[in-house]
Image (cartoon, grey):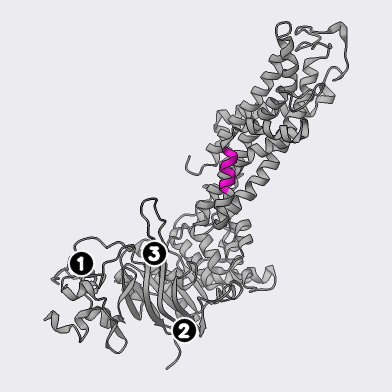
């Protein structure tokens, strides 16, 4: 089997919380708490989860925009977590990120040409200013803008157009992996579809690999090959897209799926309503972190953290219900 | 649902009308329109222009030699010959004020340039390199605990009395406010996604600072520099008034007031007019600074 493009093993990113005067003993926010997965070349891995479950932190940790606390990230056969600044800077051209908010991700004082030109000159792509300008014009065409937009400022564009500029900046340096951090959730639905299609087309023409982070299941379903479901800093289920949507295994995934609105009014759905809030990531529940809201909770869930069970080939779930050791408790 | 949308719209460009009028960039049309509507800023600019032009042309338009004594005319009140009266040596106050304006304005300019440069550098370092933040800010906080005039006096006490030392003292005492403002602005800019995007591209730190951060913090710096300009002139004049800055016969405005106060009961014009000039210039800078703040604030329409 081919080596995966990116493999992440037991990645943890914890943020220390400042000690207070009378509250001794340090603790930390466990934004990402032990995540392992791999991404093959040319595929799209979708990551879903509710707000605050650590999706974005995970994406930024892989790029080392936030330094991970523990774990290993191997990209194209090289360990990323131990790279020094010089080598990390070289690697930057291979891994890029598209941000959520197109209004915050472009410098308001720079023209489109300057924004894209900076990406090119940082990695010595294009020898002369003239050559770079040519490349910038090509990039604009690639993302569906016009070469006449080169001298304009970000505020002269709409949200969808700005997101296209963000995408152009990411593909400017010829990356092989793009982490898309909720790239369409700030856009109108009609513009969302166009931007998603742009992602698809670029993937085919440039041979890109995506990690596509989103909270909208229908968006993830549209773009992904495989999907990982995150809850409180952990991946609770990782599976092929079709299998996941046909038969979600983890109780959390089942609840998520039941919340997806359907276009067919005749389909009667049993919606699973989760009660309670997401527990705090600074003080996650013992055992299975989902046990506070789980329908099937048994005693074992409170004390023992579930293992990753490979239910079938390439299908992983972290739940005692599928663990042979505890299965009988759930009948 | 999304699948049903055709893929052939790749080249589709969102049909929003492109709005070229809403530039909030510095020195754009919009900026001047806002300034023009702000009465305070206009009045401030007029006052400042008057003082700057008269000071610049002082050798040409001054009716008398600046330091020549004429005891026949000593302590004369305002008249057609001596518009603003004369001092105890018979020197024309109007002439001396014109020349003194050059000293006062230049002191303000140098003090703001020095304190602004130091303050911006320290503020950017404190805001961008978070590990150094605590050391720089603790130091700045210590400086801030002293009232700025008191600190200026202390610095003059160390460096010695004189015009140059007074200017350095005023500059140092104005540094903390620059550091505070710049650091705050840098802190908010460095967390934005476009800085993160630049880091994700591997852009070097000094390029991020020069290309992304400084252009976005220039507005508060300009506003503060304007306000500090007035404050520095006032501080410098205060030092001269206390006898720690410009020394007589230097016609610096604070020094003129200092000399005039001995003759307060006989010659009120010796203190009133230089004092009025200080007040008007400081007022002018404050009005202009407030106007700039309103015009450069993107939230105000």
Residue A191: numbered disc: 3
Quadrant hosting residue A292: bottom left
- Marks 1 and 2 belong to one chain: yes
Residue occupied by mark 1: A293
- Secondary structure at badge 2 equals loop
Camera-side mark, 3 or 2: 2
**Are dots 3 and 2 on a single chain?**
yes
Q: Is residue B216 left or right of residue B157?
A: left
Where is residue A96 shown, x and y percent of the image?
Answer: 50, 72
Q: Looking at the figure, which quarter contains the C terminus of chain A?
A: bottom left
**Chain of the residue displaying label 2:** A
Q: Nearer the viewer, residue B213 or B239?
A: B239
Magenta range is: B137-144
Q: Which residue is mark 2?
A: A5
First reached walking from the N terminus: tag 1 or tag 2: 2
Nearest-to-viewer mark from 1 and 2: 1
């Amino acid at each position: 089997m081919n080596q995966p493009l990116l493999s992440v093993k037991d990645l943890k990113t914890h943020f220390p919380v400042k000690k207070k005067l009378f509250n001794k003993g340090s603790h930390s926010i466990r934004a990402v708490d032990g995540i392992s997965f791999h991404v093959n070349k040319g595929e799209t891995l979708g990551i879903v989860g509710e707000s605050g479950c650590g999706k974005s932190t995970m994406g930024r940790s892989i790029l080392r925009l936030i330094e991970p606390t523990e774990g290993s990230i191997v990209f194209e056969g090289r360990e990323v977590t131990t790279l020094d600044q010089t080598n990390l800077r070289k690697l930057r051209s291979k891994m890029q990120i598209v941000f959520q908010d197109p209004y915050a991700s472009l410098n308001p004082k720079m023209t489109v040409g300057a924004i894209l030109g900076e990406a090119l000159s940082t990695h010595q792509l294009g020898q002369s200013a003239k050559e770079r300008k040519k490349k910038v014009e090509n990039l604009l065409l690639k993302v569906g803008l016009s070469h006449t937009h080169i001298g304009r400022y970000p505020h002269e564009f709409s949200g969808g157009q700005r997101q296209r500029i963000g995408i152009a900046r990411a593909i400017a340096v010829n990356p092989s992996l793009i982490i898309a951090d909720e790239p369409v959730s700030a856009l109108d639905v009609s513009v969302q579809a166009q931007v998603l299609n742009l992602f698809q087309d670029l993937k085919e023409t440039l041979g890109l690999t995506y990690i596509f982070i989103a909270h909208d299941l229908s968006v993830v379903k549209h773009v992904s090959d495989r999907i990982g479901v995150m809850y409180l800093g952990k991946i609770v289920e990782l599976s092929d897209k079709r299998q996941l949507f046909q038969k979600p295994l983890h109780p959390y995934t089942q609840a998520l799926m039941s919340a997806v609105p359907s276009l067919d009014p005749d389909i009667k759905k049993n919606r699973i309503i989760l009660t309670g809030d997401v527990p705090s990531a600074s003080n996650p529940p013992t055992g299975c972190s989902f046990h506070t809201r789980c329908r099937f909770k048994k005693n074992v869930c409170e004390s023992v953290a579930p293992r990753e069970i490979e239910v079938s080939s390439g299908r992983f779930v972290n739940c005692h219900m599928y663990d042979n050791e505890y299965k009988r408790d759930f009948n | 649902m999304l699948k049903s949308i055709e893929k052939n719209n790749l080249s589709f460009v969102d049909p929003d009308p492109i709005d070229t009028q809403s530039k909030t960039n510095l020195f754009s049309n919009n900026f001047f329109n806002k300034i023009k509507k702000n009465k305070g800023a206009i009045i401030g600019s007029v006052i400042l222009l008057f003082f700057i032009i008269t000071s610049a042309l002082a050798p040409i338009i001054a009716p008398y030699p600046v330091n020549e004594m004429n005891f026949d005319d000593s302590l004369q009140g305002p008249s057609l010959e001596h518009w603003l009266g004369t001092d105890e040596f018979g020197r024309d106050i109007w002439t001396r004020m014109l020349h003194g304006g050059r000293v006062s304005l230049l002191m303000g300019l140098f003090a703001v340039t020095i304190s602004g440069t130091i303050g911006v550098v320290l503020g950017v370092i404190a805001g961008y390199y978070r590990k150094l933040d605590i050391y720089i800010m603790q130091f700045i906080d210590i400086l801030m605990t002293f009232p700025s005039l008191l600190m200026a006096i202390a610095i003059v006490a160390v460096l010695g009395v004189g015009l140059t030392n007074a200017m350095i003292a005023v500059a140092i005492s104005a540094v903390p406010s620059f550091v505070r403002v710049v650091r705050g602005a840098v802190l908010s800019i460095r967390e934005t996604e476009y800085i993160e995007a630049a880091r994700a591209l591997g852009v070097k730190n000094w390029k991020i600072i020069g290309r992304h951060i400084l252009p976005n913090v220039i507005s508060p710096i300009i506003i503060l520099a304007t306000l500090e300009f007035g404050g520095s002139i006032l501080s410098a004049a205060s030092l001269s008034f206390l006898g720690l800055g410009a020394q007589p016969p230097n016609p610096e405005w604070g020094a003129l007031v200092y000399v005039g106060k001995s003759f307060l009961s006989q010659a009120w014009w010796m203190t009133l007019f230089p004092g009025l000039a200080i007040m008007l210039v400081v007022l002018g800078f404050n009005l202009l600074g407030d106007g700039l703040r309103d015009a450069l604030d993107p939230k105000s329409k």
